[in-house]
Amino acid sequence: MTGSAFSLVGGAAPDTQVRPDPAVVPLAQASSDDAAAADVFETAVEPIDQEPEIADAAGLVKAAQLAEQQVTRAAEQARAEAERAAAEAARGPVSCDLNTSDLGRVKSNVRTAAEQLGCTFGRPTMYGVAGRAGTSDHPGGLAVDFMVDRATGDRLAACALENMDALGVKYVIWRQRINFGSGWKPMEDRGGATANHFDHVHVSFDRGSGGGTLRGC
């Protein structure tokens, strides 16, 4: 078609503008159900807290072992106390029908110790205040002689030494030996069984001490 112009009737430039999808509703205009769904979404994507630290396994094992040791020590102490109480009960009371007439006017702490030792070891004859030549605790009422046999004397002497603090014991003489609490030492020969303490245990006491309860014999 020469010399003429071609025109498309009713033609228009293409529309390049993007129109919103009617199915998509802005959040500000969303319904209450849509808002709740948004809240769920936001909660779902919140950051997760870090996992808590797990205690050291070695530390837990050590703590358990310490606890077991404490329980064991407590049980051992309780057992020891029970055994001690049973031993004391088996020994019987420290008071008995004991003849103390030969003690004389010994000090009160000395009398208490003599009664406990005498009742524990067969109620032997006991001598207290008496005149003695040379240095002696007898005249001052601070010594007791227990007339015993060899076996009983061995046990009585050991018991007096084991209870030195409780009874106020100063020293013990038995079978020509003396013991101040640090071991037996030999003594000079005084010329006879009685003078050398082969037939009795001599126990001397400190003034104003002792008065406690005999234990462990």
Image (cartoon, helix red, strand yellow):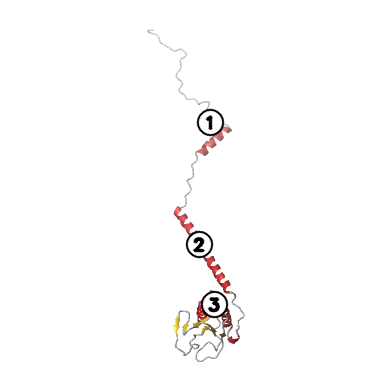
The residue at 46%/55% (across/down) is: 61
Residue type pointed to by label 2: Thr
2 or 3: tag closer to the N-terminus: 2
In this rendering, the answer to whether 5 lies above or below 99 is above
Residue 189 percent location from the top left of the image: 45, 88
Q: Is residue 64 visible?
A: yes
As drawn, the residue found furthest toward the left would be 2
- Secondary structure, mark 2, is helix
User: Badge 2, how many Cα within 10 Å: few under 14, some, many 20+?
Assistant: few
Q: Is residue 105 visible?
A: no
1 or 3: tag closer to the N-terminus: 1
Q: What's the CA distance linking mark 2 and mark 1?
A: 73 Å
Residue type pointed to by label 1: Pro
Which is in the foreground here, disc 2 or disc 1? Answer: 2
- Residue at the spot of label 2: 72
Q: Mark on residue 203? A: none
The residue at 44%/54% (across/down) is: 58
Which is in the foreground here, disc 1 or disc 3? Answer: 3
Front residue of 109/2: it is 109
User: Badge 1, how many Cα within 10 Å: few under 14, some, many 20+?
Assistant: few
In this rendering, the answer to whether 52 lies above or below 141 is above
- Secondary structure, mark 3, is helix
- Residue at the spot of label 1: 26
Residue 205 percent location from the top left of the image: 53, 83
Q: What's the CA distance linking mark 1 and mark 3?
A: 96 Å
Q: Mark on residue 166? A: 3
Front residue of 97/187: it is 97
The residue at 53%/66% (across/down) is: 79
In this rendering, the answer to whether 105 lies above or below 79 is below
Label 2–label 3 contact, CB within 8 A: no
Residue 216 percent location from the top left of the image: 53, 74
2 or 1: tag closer to the N-terminus: 1
